[in-house]
Amino acid sequence: MTLEAYLIVAAALFALGLIGAMSHRNLIALLIGIELMMNAASLNLMAFNRFVVADPTVGQIFVLIIIGLAAAEVAIFLSIILRLYRAYRDIDAEKLTELSG
């Protein structure tokens, strides 16, 4: 595969994630959309790492950082979603406009 093919796949993946994050009101679907966008960024970094950069560890380190951030994001976001569900019995983002504690 060429660099352009990887970039097209990453752009499609990012677009799907953006559409998913913007169109769904469910917080789980929002989380999945954000994760798709982060995976598209990781794919871009690895594609440029393979075809452009001379040192192969640069892109791999960035991707490992993104994976670590994604894991932390999922853990925190899911705990917030569980807390919201226990309090309001719903995870629809539009119904949760007032978050008084």
Image (spheres, grey):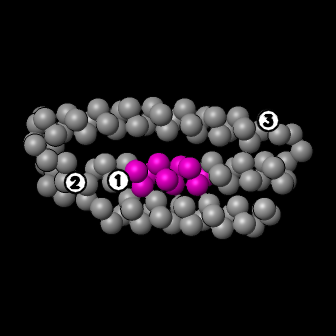
Mark 3 element type = helix
Which residue is painted at 58% across and 39% down in the image? Answer: 66
For mark 3, what is the residue? 57
> Magenta stretch mostly in which secondary structure?
helix
For mark 2, what is the residue? 93
Q: CA distance from mark 2 to mark 3?
A: 40 Å
Residue contact between numbered discs 2 and 1, judged by CB atoms under 8 Å: yes
Q: Is residue 33 magenta?
A: yes
Which residue is painted at 66% across and 67% down in the image? Answer: 8
Residue contact between numbered discs 2 and 3, judged by CB atoms under 8 Å: no
Q: CA distance from mark 2 to mark 1?
A: 9 Å
Q: Is residue 86 above or below residue 47?
A: above
Which stretch did the figure color magenta? 32-41
Tell me the quadrant of the picture where the N terminus can be found: bottom right
Q: Is residue 70 among what the camera can see? A: yes
Residue contact between numbered discs 1 and 3, judged by CB atoms under 8 Å: no
Kindly give the residue lying farthest to the left in the view shown. Answer: 88
Characterize the local packing of mark 2: few (<14), some (14-19) or many (20 or more) Cα atoms within 10 angstroms. Answer: few
Mark 1 element type = helix
Q: Amino acid at mark 3?
A: Thr
Which residue is painted at 25% across and 59% down in the image? Answer: 25
Tell me the quadrant of the picture where the C terminus can be found: top left
Characterize the local packing of mark 1: few (<14), some (14-19) or many (20 or more) Cα atoms within 10 angstroms. Answer: many
Which residue is painted at 63% across and 48% down in the image? Answer: 42
For mark 1, what is the residue? 30
Kindly give the residue lying farthest to the right in the view shown. Answer: 54
First in sequence, mark 2 or 3: give its number: 3
